[in-house]
Amino acid sequence: MLTKALLRVSRAGGGYRPRFAGREHRPLAARVLGTYQGHVGEPREKLDAALEDLETEADDFKLVRGFAKLLDREAVFETRAAVSPERARRVAFEAAESVGVVSEAERTEALRQAGQHFGTTPDSVATSLYADLDERQVLAEFDSRWDPDQLVAQYNLSLGQTALFDATELRVRTSDPKALVSAVKRLRLMYEIRKTEGENRVSDREVVVTGPDALFRSTRRYGTRFARLLRTVAKADEWTVSAAIDDYGTERTLSLSDDDPVRVPGTEPVADVMFDSSVEADFAARFESLDLDWELTREPEPLETGARVMIPDFAFDYLPASVASGGSSDSSDGVHADFRVFFEIMGFWTPEYVEKKLSQLETVEDVELLVAVDESLGVGEEIAARDHRAIPYSGTIRLKDVRDALRRYEDELVAESVADLPDELVPETDVISLEALAREQGVSEDAIADKSFPDHERVGRTLVRPAVLSDLAEEIESGMAFSEAEAVLDEVGVEDASAVLSELGFAVEWEGLSGGTVVEKS
């Protein structure tokens, strides 16, 4: 971003249009770059003088200063002095006080005494006195990330951002709405998503970002959040921005789109923050450390709320052990892997914004929604009245509260699954454990404990067809090594060898660490 003093806009026709740099300004950008490169090792005052010369030649001095403002962030300036300027001033001023400096000769004497103190010459002390002033600092290094074309691109992005300093509202359409909403929430801006009628080349959804005049007193800090948001917007392939600008008391409209020369130079590093707030980041880290049957998804698909749209902070996807271990996720098998609970965190919001969100929650239909609400907002009962589950918190969200809420859903899902089960279960396989069968049905093992299995016999925690048991009785005989018998059982899928051997009338006689032998039960 640039400073407000470097803003270049046209107000022709009552509009508010940034005066972007074009291809014709590339030579000027190259000259500014060359000026910095040519003054490495020189004091800033010489660099500034050279830049002032360029300003007199350019059509607009603000353009030169804008380029220079960006390049200053690429430059490393150092204080170079024989003696620390602070120490040089302290000792020289003490010497001047003892000498009583009035004339040039007395000044020279004070500097001589200071030089003796530091073991250097009076001239070295004199040049060190104010070497830390900005204009006397030396350009030590200059390694710009930008070539002339990239500098022009960065200038245009920064100019667009600066033009948004005094915005009070933004209306944005983008081909990447998820990235936009994530940035809006991360910057702690207030927003709503509206569905619009009619065709639009970018999107039928408009993200309206509310400005400081609506909720807060106007501050530059808030305005810079709008400016930072443009960087995310400009990354999308297609986008439009319409901003209401408070131009010294006159409301003007700023319109930008991907047709404008506003791009994000690819060489500029981006430190994207994963979460919108420390509350969210803390919750996600702690939740994912738990071993639950729920998978946390950040910023899931939008929810329809009448004519508007909301994107919750998280979603919990029910992922029972059967799915997590590679089982079927088809809901027709009774597994509720497609069951989703949305999770919204109400934290830093103002009373006005809370009212907006509450009205949105009221129109959310046919979805399960948990809302973690900061206790200071005092709207937990209103959320519950809208048929959503409210989880109060202060500072951090308690995992136990979220876990308890999710378990209520689990209990309901299991109860539904049990109610749908027939009294008789007929597994397709010859041998199956009760655990595996319960997984297939999407229920707990206890839920099928009282069911009947007409085609199988229950042997311990395993179901086995009678024909398989007959075959096993012929293959396994007394005196066989337990390891051999175990291999026979493993071939047909029996995991609980001891229970099946007992059903067949055998026991295992163990011989210490050397193994065991199958014998007939006495």
Image: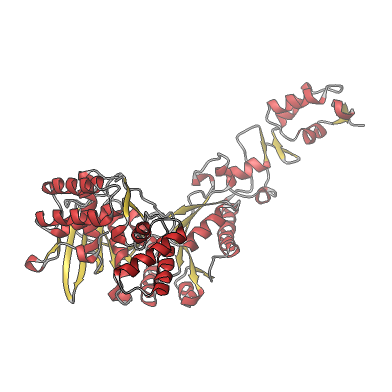
View extreme (right): residue = 522
- Residue at the spot 27% in from the left edge and 52% down from the top edge: 71
In the rendered image, the vertical position of residue 125 relative to residue 500, given as above or below: below
Protein image colouring: secondary structure
In the image, 52: left or right of 378? left
In the image, 13: left or right of 18? left
Residue 199 can be seen, yes or no = no
Q: Quadrant of the C terminus?
A: top right
- Residue at the spot 17% in from the left edge and 52% down from the top edge: 260
In the rendered image, the vertical position of residue 137 relative to residue 472, given as above or below: below
- Residue at the spot 82% in from the left edge and 34% down from the top edge: 502
Residue 514 percent location from the top left of the image: 86, 25
Residue 390 percent location from the top left of the image: 50, 69
- Determine which quarter of the picture holds residue 146: top left
Nearest the eye: 271 or 454: 271
Q: Quadrant of the N terminus?
A: bottom left
Residue 521 percent location from the top left of the image: 89, 31
Nearest the eye: 158 or 472: 158
Residue 25 percent location from the top left of the image: 13, 49
Nearest the eye: 298 or 368: 298
View extreme (left): residue = 13
- Residue at the spot 55% in from the left edge and 39% down from the top edge: 326
